[in-house]
Amino acid sequence: MLETWRWFGPDDPVSLEQIRQAGATGVVSSLSQIPTGDVWPLVDIEAHKQLIESAGLVWSVVESVPLHNDIKTRSGHYRHLISNYQKTLINLGAAGIHTVCYNFMPVVDWTRTNLEYVLPDNSQALRFDIVDFAVYDIFVLQRSGATDSYDKAVVEGARARFEGLDQPAVAALENNIIAGLPGGEGSYDRAGVLAAINHFNQFDNEAYRQNLIAFLRDIMPSAEVADINMVIHPDDPPFSLFGLPRVLSTAEDVRKLVAAVPSASNGLTLCAGSFGARGDNNLVAMAKEFGDRIHFVHLRNIKRESDGSFYESAHLEGDNDIVGLIAALLAVEAEDTSGQRAIAMRPDHGHTLTSEQADPRLKPGYSYGGRMKGLAELRGVIHALTALGTGGRP
């Protein structure tokens, strides 16, 4: 497997030198300074690539070329925006970058309610608490019909919790949910997020899925010419937020997408934490079934709770079988008769250790020490399984 690391560009508090010292050889990055929907100029792509290569690393994966909401809703200037997206793919291919991660989540990108959840060892993790989310949706945002989106016990729990919150706590919760997390597609204020929700609530799951399929059919010719693997990231969390549709949360969702758009360029990012937040997703089975589509992997772990809440555990702890998943992915690589296939993976959402907790530059989930710890653990699993033979288990 190709060991990679997320880098947010020159302003990232984690430098390229540190990434190399952590042991990664590939970089996962983006041109986040370019507004969503604009073409990525070849000269800008090449300049960013040169920065990475000058540090002795390789730009392995683009995460991401974000999709404008007009593309997701097939409205407004979506045809012009799709043309821009096609041009960006051609430019990326010309620069020798051939894997593009993207997502199709409506309104909010990956979402958490607590960015500093304290663990028993005093490190901090990311957490999604369904009751806290309901507090915001029902009592702060006051979305019409919000109570219908939750079980009665969650609604009552949210009511009681809201009554105990002061204004700073409400503001912090709102900021966590709608202000935009690292690598996301922007932020909202309260009025803006309500307007966006109303714009998207015209779609149910199947209607929204058809928009995703239409987008992929539009761009596949360009992706194929550029030799680009478009690897969709699953919904995070993999269930509805704000009553909005979800179209990539389960294995069946992947099957539907592959059947509708069979192009070899239509691939998958297997995010263990996102798919794994649902107990009915079998990650090992998914790796085996969709192995020929998987070109990028986010290896992280979570602890699930019965009401749908979860927090992000250490990489080799939690409810996901990370060792089994890595074994399955190594077997997928070995099936390539050329012997050249190496699936890009990165440690994802490391814990914030004590030494970094006071750093104001820290991006939630993207600490240096926590991810370096995770990468070392994952590397150990890869080396042990490889020594035992492809797909071997202790």
Image (tube, grey):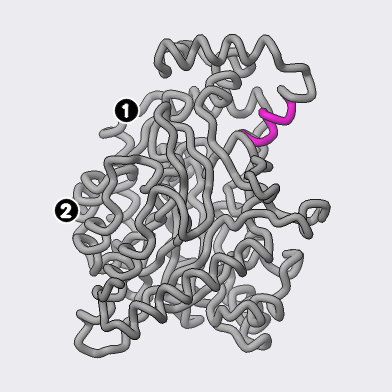
Q: Quadrant of the C terminus?
A: bottom left
The reply to whether the magenta stretch includes residue 48 is: no
Element at label 2: helix
Q: Main secondary structure of the magenta part?
A: helix
Mark 1 vs 2, N-terminal side:
1
Residue topped by disc 2? 259
Instruction: Report crowding for label 1: few under 14, some 14 to 19, many 20 or more residues within 10 A (C-alpha).
Output: some
Q: Position of residue 183 (x, y in %)?
A: 59, 54
Give 47 or 142, whichever is nearer the viewer: 142
Residue topped by disc 1? 204
Instruction: Report crowding for label 2: few under 14, some 14 to 19, many 20 or more residues within 10 A (C-alpha).
Output: few
Q: CA distance from mark 1 to mark 2?
A: 20 Å
Q: Quadrant of the N terminus?
A: bottom left
Residue stretch rendered in magenta on the structure: 171-177
Q: Position of residue 137 (x, y in %)?
A: 55, 20
The reply to whether the magenta stretch includes residue 173 is: yes
